Every structure is written in C-alpha cells, then in structure tokens.
Image (cartoon, grey):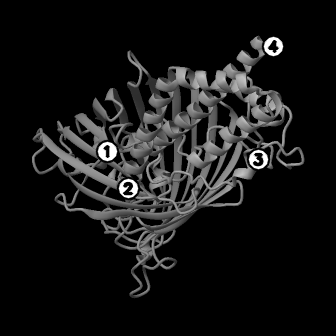
C-alpha cells in the first residue's frame, strides 16, 4: 500500500513537471515562430477552461477515458506517458470538444492552475490519504529548485515574446531585400562601329526592397523599391547578345519597380493583377529552376529563360496572369500584358489599344524529375515600340521591318517548348526552343504582307552542390534569336536578313559563402556576334556578388 502511495505521488510530480514543461516548450516554439515568421501574432489563449480541464464530472462532453481518444496525441510525443497517466489513471484531464488536446499551444497561468487543482482534487477524492498528501508535499519540496528554474525560464520566454511582438516590423508585412554588385567588361569583336576595340571594365549595382503583405494568409501584395546603376553591355558591344542578367541605370535613384496583388481562386487557382512592371516569368513556370534568377542564376540575360516570357514587358507595363492546377501533373497559365497601359492619348496606348502580348501555356509534370511546357503568345507592337525578342538576339530579330526603314507596327505569333529534367541528384538538364512569325502592320505599301521567321534555342546543364553544398556550376549553350527566313527586301535594297547564325556559350560557378551571400564568376562568349561572321567573337567576363536579407 505504501508503495502504491509513493508511486501515486511520483506520478503527480511527473504530471506537474510535464505540464510546466509543456508550457515552457510551447512558449519557446512561439518565440522561434516569431523570429521565423515576422508579422504573425502569437495566438491568444482564450479557450474556456471547462473545455480543457475536467474536475471529475463524468457527464462532460469533452471527457475522455483513454489517451487514444485524443486525435493529436501520439505515442512518440515526449509527454505521452504523463498524459496517459493523467487521463486514464487519474481522470483529471479532458480534451477539447473536437477530440484534440492541442499540446503545442501555450497555456495561460489560469489554465495551468485549474489543471493542477483538478488533478489534486481527483487524487484527494479517489486515492489520496493524509500520508499521500504528505508524500506529495515532500516531492514538491524535493523538486522546488527545478520548479523555480522552470518558472524563471517561462517568465523569461514570456518577456522575450512581448518584446518581439512590440518591436516587429509589421503584423502583416515582411521586408525582403537584395543587393547585387556586378563587375564586367566587353572585349569587343568589332560590332561597335565607334571604335571596334576592347571596352573599359565597369562596376555597377542594383538594390531592391520587397514589401510583401498578406491580409488573409493566402494572398500577397508586393510593393518593390529599386535603385540601380549598371549600364547595359549592348551600349559597349553594339548588340543585345552581350547583356548581363542584371542591368539598367537610373543613377541609383529609388523608384517603385514592381506592384502586384496575388490571391487564390478556389482551391487550385491563382490570379495576379500587375499595376507596374508586369511580366510572365515571375508568375509562370519557366522550367529553368536553377538558372532563371537574375541574382543567383545565369549571368546572361538570354540564359535565364525563353524570350517568349519577356514580350511586352516594360517598366510601365500592366496586366494579369491566371494559373490553374487541374492535377499535380497538369496545369494551365493564361496572361495578358500591356506595354503602355497608362497612355490613352490618340489611337495608340492604353490597356487594350496599344502594344500587348497574350500568352497561354500548358504545363505537364509526368514524373517528379521531369516536366515541360508548351507556350503560345500573340504580340502586337506599336510603331516606335517594336522589340520582338525582349532585349536578346540581333538587332534585326528584335525589329525585322525597321531596318533600315525605321520602326513600324508589327504583330507576331510565337511558340515556345521548354523542359526541365533532373537527370541525377546533382545534375539538371533544361532548355527551350522558340519560334516567332513576325508580320508587318505598318503603312509602307511596299512592305504589305512582309513576314519574317525568327528562332532561338538553348540547352542548360546545371550542377547543384558542385564541390560543396549550396554551390552551383552551370554550362549554357544556345542560339540567340536570329532571322532565318523572310519574304521582303527594304526599299533601298540594303541587306535585310541575318547573314549568319550566332552561337552563345556561357559558363559560371556560384560560391554560396553563407545563407545570405553568394559570389558568381563566369564568362559569356558570343560567336558571330549580332549574327554576322565578319564580327569577331565577343568575350564578356562577369563577377556578380549577391546579398540577400
């Protein structure tokens, strides 16, 4: 009998320590959650005590007689045996009406006091004698130091929680930043007619601050501020083929660079509305998981993804993108981007009256390691705004009917096939093929019915974790956009086609210094620069350093 009493006392002591430990562990988890998920409020402990603690009333709806009736308590849980004793032996703990215990939730001191009081009442009523209570009292004295230590930890964690709540940036908004330093030089092969010699090395930067806000937990409002000072390499080389992944120059003046709102539609749909800097590639799968990023992927503009995803993209573009997943293996993306939506003067411009691109893509994932997409885009570019290849390829491919007659209105139909295949855990093969049929839509009668066919392709070999975890090696080969067929001649008889096809070669290795800093040296080589074999190859070394925070 005495042995049974001692064990009863020990069980009660274990229960006390377990309940206090649950509270300390739960508060610690909430502190960690605040650090990781800035902007989220700690859940208030506002549950009625009667739904958690049963003081012996067998008629309570929440009363349980076995720990197995609590759906969220598993035998592997660290406090399982203590809960089992409190439920099955002493009958002083009950769950919530939905059959859960919610052991990871923080408990208030009131709830803890009520739970302890209920257990003491049960022991006094059913088991305890005066000797039992003396044993419990002795145990309380024996563990007094441990209980005091736990109390101090709980008080300290509550103080830290209050401090984090008071000092957090926002309850709804997360701030993410990126800063890129880029050094490069074009060893020009002669396409720059002003000198035809090697250019000077340049060093520039780009800084971005993303403010991502969620009002429901499933939506996203992004406001991005950007400042940059990187002169595009096409100024030095005379061709878009040498452009790096990051460029643009506003003299480091901060401007609003991106503004969109994204929200779910039903269970499988997602809708994004852009008010500024609308694009397809940020919301549509480009099937280039390792090299699509301008800050940590390819060092060239062309190497990031198929140019079809950049059509009609400008600093002022607006539009919408809709994504829908029929199954885990089949998806559809639809989008519309207007290049000059705010211009309503005259017959051009506006959301529906000016330059635009409408895109549709079917996305298939037949295996976990392999996926591909088929994209179609229809584009109309106004006079003066023609750029069919989004800053890649030859000058003629970007504006096939404006050389040498000047920029005229153009429409185009483009097809893109892109894929990604994880051949091995540390090797990914991706790539694309693109075709564009451009049609003259200007008012020069001699060019009525003029057409031009433009192609591009790329194969990309990425090696994640090469030599060290987090690092990335990559080789990119391909052909930037060039006109391979046309049915017209300019009025002045000048050569209107791309006489030769180019060849793009790129190699890079990204050193992941830590979670927030990476350094990527690499080189871009363009053979037959600007699609002309009379031009020597362009050689472009690049060193890019990216900081994220």
Q: Quadrant of residue 543?
A: top left
Circle 1 residues within 10 Å: few <14, some 14–19, many ≥20: many
**Of the two numbered discs 1 and 2 in the rendering, the one whose residue sits closer to the viewer:** 2
Asked if one can make out residue 172 in the rendered structure from this viewpoint, the answer is yes
Give the residue pinned by disc 3.
Answer: 96
Examine the rendered structure and indicate whether residue 522 appears above or below residue 97.
above
Is residue 304 or residue 152 the one in the foreground? 152
Residue that mark 1 sits on? 241
Is label 4 in contact with label 1 (beta carbons under 8 Å)? no
Disc with the residue nearer the chain's start (1 vs 3): 3
41 to 365, vertically: above or below: below
Note whether residue 480 is visible. no
Few, some or many residues within 10 Å of mark 4 (<14, 14–19, 20+): few
Instruction: Please give the name of the residue rendered at 23% of the width and 54% of the height, measured from the top-left corner.
Output: 228
Apparent side of residue 68 relative to residue 138 in the rendered image (left or right): right
Q: Which mark is residue 298?
A: none
For residue 70, which quarter of the picture?
top right
């Amino acid at each position: 009998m005495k042995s049974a009493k001692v064990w009863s006392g020990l069980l009660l002591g274990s229960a006390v320590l377990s309940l206090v430990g649950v509270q300390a562990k739960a508060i610690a988890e909430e502190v960690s959650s605040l650090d990781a998920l800035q902007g989220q409020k700690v859940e208030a402990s506002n549950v009625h005590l009667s739904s958690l603690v049963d003081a012996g009333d067998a008629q309570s709806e929440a009363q349980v007689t076995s720990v197995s009736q609590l759906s969220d308590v598993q035998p592997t849980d660290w406090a399982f045996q203590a809960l089992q004793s409190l439920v099955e032996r002493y009958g002083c703990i009950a769950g919530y009406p939905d059959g859960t215990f919610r052991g990871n939730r923080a408990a208030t001191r009131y709830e803890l006091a009520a739970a302890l009081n209920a257990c003491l009442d049960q022991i006094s009523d059913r088991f305890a004698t005066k000797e039992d209570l003396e044993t419990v009292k002795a145990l309380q004295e024996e563990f007094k130091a441990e209980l005091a230590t736990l109390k101090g930890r709980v008080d300290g964690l509550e103080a830290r929680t209050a401090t984090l709540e008071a000092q957090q940036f926002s309850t709804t908004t997360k701030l993410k930043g990126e800063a890129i330093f880029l050094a490069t030089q074009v060893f020009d092969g002669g396409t720059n007619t002003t000198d035809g010699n090697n250019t000077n090395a340049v060093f520039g930067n780009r800084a971005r601050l993303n403010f991502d806000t969620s009002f429901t937990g499933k939506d996203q409002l992004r406001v991005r501020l950007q400042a940059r000072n990187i002169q595009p390499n096409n100024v030095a080389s005379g061709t878009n083929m040498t452009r790096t992944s990051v460029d643009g120059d506003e003299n480091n003046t901060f401007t609003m660079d991106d503004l969109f709102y994204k929200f779910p539609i039903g269970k499988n749909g997602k809708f994004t509305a852009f008010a500024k800097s609308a694009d397809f590639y940020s919301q549509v799968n480009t099937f280039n998981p390792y090299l699509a990023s301008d800050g940590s992927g390819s060092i060239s503009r062309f190497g990031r993804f198929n140019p079809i995803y950049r059509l009609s993209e400008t600093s002022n573009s607006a539009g919408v993108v809709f994504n829908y997943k029929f199954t885990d293996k089949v998806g559809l993306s639809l989008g519309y981007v207007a290049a000059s939506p705010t211009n309503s003067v005259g017959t051009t411009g506006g959301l529906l009256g000016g330059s635009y691109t409408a895109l549709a893509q079917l996305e298939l994932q037949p295996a976990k390691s392999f996926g591909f997409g088929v994209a179609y885009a229809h584009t109309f570019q106004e006079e003066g705004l023609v750029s069919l290849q989004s800053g890649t390829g030859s000058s003629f491919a970007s504006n096939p009917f404006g050389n040498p007659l000047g920029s005229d209105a153009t429409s185009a139909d483009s097809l893109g096939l892109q894929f990604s295949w994880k051949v091995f855990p540390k090797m990914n093969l991706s790539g694309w093929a693109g075709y564009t049929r451009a049609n003259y839509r200007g008012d020069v009668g001699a060019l009525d019915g003029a057409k031009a066919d433009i192609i591009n392709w790329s194969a990309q070999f990425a090696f994640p974790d090469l030599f060290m975890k987090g690092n990335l090696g990559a080789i990119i080969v391909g052909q930037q956009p060039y006109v391979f067929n046309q049915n017209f001649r300019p009025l002045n008889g000048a050569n209107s086609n791309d006489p030769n096809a180019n060849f793009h070669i790129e190699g890079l290795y990204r050193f992941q210094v830590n979670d927030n800093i990476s350094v990527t040296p690499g080189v871009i080589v363009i053979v037959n620069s600007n699609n002309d074999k009379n031009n020597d190859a362009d050689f472009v070394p690049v060193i890019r350093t990216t900081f994220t925070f």
